[in-house]
Amino acid sequence: MTQNMETDPFNVSMRKFLKQVGVTSQQAIEKAVADAGLKGQGPLTVRAVITAERAGLHHVVEGEIDLG
């Protein structure tokens, strides 16, 4: 019997991890911006790094967040 994407343990676990990364990262960025008083001061360059040593993964995502 083949599992679909909704029940595949790997896929479910991955989605849970990525949701946690997204939510906690947003909270951390919002706090850092507020603490530094940066709201309304143009773009903020950000970088996210995901590593998985056993899999040899080192993934970097870079971008800008408009602070207004």
Image (cartoon, helix red, strand yellow):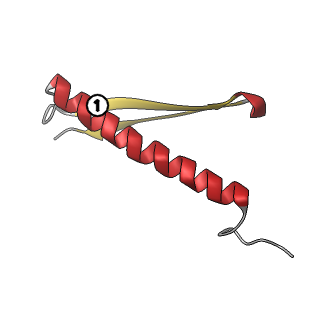
Q: Which residue is rendered at x = 71% and y = 55% of the image?
A: 10
Residue at the right extreme, as displayed = 1
- Residue at 57 percent across and 55 percent down: it is 15
Amino acid type, mark 1: Leu
- Read off the residue under disc 1: 44
Q: Quadrant of residue 42?
A: top left
Residue 60 falls left or right of residue 62: right
Image position, residue 66 (x, y; %)? 25, 40
Q: Quadrant of residue 12?
A: bottom right
Does residue 45 appear left or right of residue 52 in this picture?
left
Location of residue 48 with respect to 22 vertically, above or below: above
Q: Horizontal and vertical percent for residue 45?
A: 34, 29
Give the residue displayed 25% in from the left and 33% down from the top: 31
* Number of disc labels: 1
Looking at the image, which is closer to me, 46 or 3?
3
Quarter of the image that includes the C terminus: top left
Residue 40 relative to residue 3: left or right? left
Q: Position of residue 54 (x, y in %)?
A: 77, 30
Q: Quadrant of the N terminus?
A: bottom right
* Residue 2 percent across, percent down from the top left: 83, 73
The secondary structure type at the circle numbered 1 is strand
Label 1 neighbour load within 10 Å: few <14, some 14-19, many 20+: some
